[in-house]
Amino acid sequence: MATMERPPRDGGDFGTSPVREMLKIALPSVLTMTSYTVMQFIDALMVSRIQPADPVYVAAQGNGGIAIWLVVATVMGMLTVINTYVAQHLGAGRPERGSAYAWAAIWMSLVFALLIIPYAGVLPAVFRAQDHAGALLELETEYARIMALGAFMLTASRGLQHYFYGMHRPQIVMVAAFAGNVCNVFVNWVLIFGNLGAPELGLAGAAWGTVAGVTVELLIPMVMFLGPGMHRAYQTRHFWRPSWRPVKDIVRLGWPGAAMFANEMICWTYLMTFLGPAGGRAAAAARGLGPEDIARAGEIANSAGWAALRYMHMSFMPAVGVSIAVTALVGRSMGMKRPDLAAARARLGLKIAMWYMGLCAVIFLVFRAELIAVFAPGNMDEPTRNQLIAVGAKIMIAAAVFQLFDAIAITISGALRGAGDTIWPGVATVVLSWVCIVGGGHLMIALFPGLGEMGPWIAASAYIMLLGVALLWRYARGPWRGIDLVGRSEVAAGEAADAEGPGAETRTSAALSEVPGG
């Protein structure tokens, strides 16, 4: 029976029940993603309390954050396949090979951090191109430039996280995330409001809090990775020198993920910072309002969209945690040449994600106004507050509609990634996002201006629903079952080439004697 199979050499816990095996990885991953979501929620809530009360702070934080996340997502999307490689080598009984991918992530992150500097310099022009001006432009530019300083820590920490996910040690990631989030909130409290004698930095304080938090998130897994226990078992310090072999593996399998993440971020950035506000302005113009009221309608649509998105994060981020676990379990199963076991773990993860996100859909629908009201302080002027709540509540309805489809897309993409099937999902994501979010969003504003910001959000909902169906179809067809990722990896090929040298057999045996179960 499948559940009684024991993998070779440190291959995992297939002797346990499937649910326990899933929860062993998924629960820490979900708690990690949930902690990020709670931190982001608290972060936005603290920003919304900056005085004088104005929705511009939440909008500036969202716009500035996503402007940096837009470019960071390219690297982070590529680094997700580290989980796949590490898990498959674990399943194949060669876990020490995974260390090379962690070091590759660190070197790639350093190069990326240098490349982001010119981008930070042109951010004002980027925001002006989206019709941003005044206080919004000034605040979002400052926030984004501070966030850019944390680019190395953010991407390097995510690379190490995917290493530990692939090694089925998500508890390390969970501890680092909790510590980083606590640091983030504490620094926010000190710098946003000027507590403990610190200067009152307002929105800039929130950015510095995030940089401090991601620094802690990098240091904890780095200390564990370089520690004597991990080095004895998995040669984690052996691969520290820059090497093209693991980088080539990551790029070869990860470029579709990078394109997918970056493209989604471009389209969602466009939705949040341009299409949503443009829809709000179009509705105000259709009602015959004046220029000042039209501009204000755009700002409110922008802020309401970010408020609603905070709750969407609370829905899909735990599902991302399940997806990470599915990637690790599918990857290990494929490394063991067990696609049947991989399919069973993918189905189990899908059930968990759909139950959770289905519950979120009900909450979004029933308590939509109350949820948005959290981001509308009582001392905000009454007409603005009422309009913010009304607009945000409508967006929550759109979010409720696509929750189950989002669960399918998130989980199945993780399963396909774990097997090494990344190109088809990447292409599907790019095509559908541009057709639905960008093309559909503009079409809705042009044809139905009276719908306001809801026009683009309806188009975005259609995108998620179609993506979920498309990825499920790809998974059901099953080409992923025949992929042999470990057999054609550059790291494996390089090790085989090295083994041809004098004394290689002795060196390899000595190294493997340090691996538990070797």
Image (spheres, helix red, strand yellow):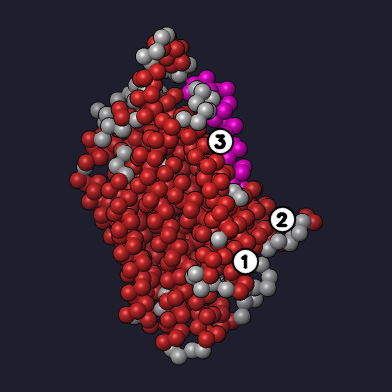
Residue at the disc numbered 1: 139
Q: Does residue 303 sit above or below 104 in this rendering?
A: below
Kind of residue indicated by mark 3: Pro
Q: Does residue 515 sit above or below 424 in this rendering?
A: above
Q: Which residues are magenta?
A: 213-234
The mark found on residue 221 in the picture is 3
Residue at the disc numbered 2: 190
Residue at 64% across, 58% down: 206
**Quarter the N terminus occupies:** top left
Residue sitting nearer the eye, 99 or 488: 488
Residue at 30% across, 49% down: 425
Label tally: 3
Q: Does residue 505 sit above or below 196 in this rendering?
A: above
Q: Provide the secondary structure element on which disc 1 rests.
A: helix
Disc 3 and disc 1: Cα gap in Å? 33 Å
Q: Residues within 10 Å of mark 2 (few under 14, many from 20)?
A: some
